Image (cartoon, rainbow, N blue to C red):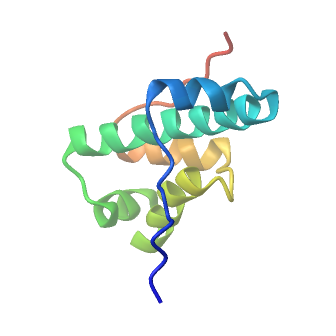
Amino acid sequence: MVNDTYQPAPHDAAFRKQLLANPDVQAAFDVGAIEYAILDEMLSARKEAGLTQAQVAERMGTQAPAVARLENSLASGKHSPSIETLRKYAKALGKRLEVHLV
């Protein structure tokens, strides 16, 4: 049976503004935005270094699935990696970890 009444939600600026008017939605968005910004930094740095997850894992002294879980944990929000893990990841990329409070 086909559901002909399905209408996908709009994803334009007006819809986003309407959603973010709800304080609970805004708070959840803010938390997610931070995690996605960290993930974006990590993936950009790995791409810049020209390394695969397996290569990063080897440099960290772990296995590729662990690096995949680390990167996916930020996207899913199910786990927050430790500062030490992020430091090892950064070092594997030839970078250093910095945390700024603004």
Q: Residue at x 40, y 70 (%)?
A: 64
Relative to 2, is 79 above or below? Answer: above
Q: Residue furthest bottom?
A: 1
**x then y, percent, for residue 32:** 62, 39
**In the image, what residue occupies the spot 33% across and 61% down?**
53
Given the current orientation, which residue lies at the most extreme front position? 4
Q: Is residue 27 above or below residue 56?
A: above
On the image, the x and y values in percent for residue 79 come to 68, 57
| Residue 30 to residue 88: above or below | above
Residue pushed farthest top? 102
Q: Is residue 69 placed above or below 94 in the rendered structure?
A: below
| 76 or 83: nearer the viewer | 76
User: Which residue is found at the position 48% from the left and 57% from the top?
Assistant: 7
Task: Specify the quadrant of the image occupied by residue 84.
Answer: top right
Can you give x and y, in whole percent of width and height, for residue 41 in the image?
41, 34
Q: Is residue 86 left or right of residue 45?
A: right
To which quarter of the image does residue 67 belong?
bottom left
Residue depicted at 65% across the width and 32% down the height: 19
Relative to 23, 30 lies left or right: left
Q: Is residue 88 visible?
A: yes
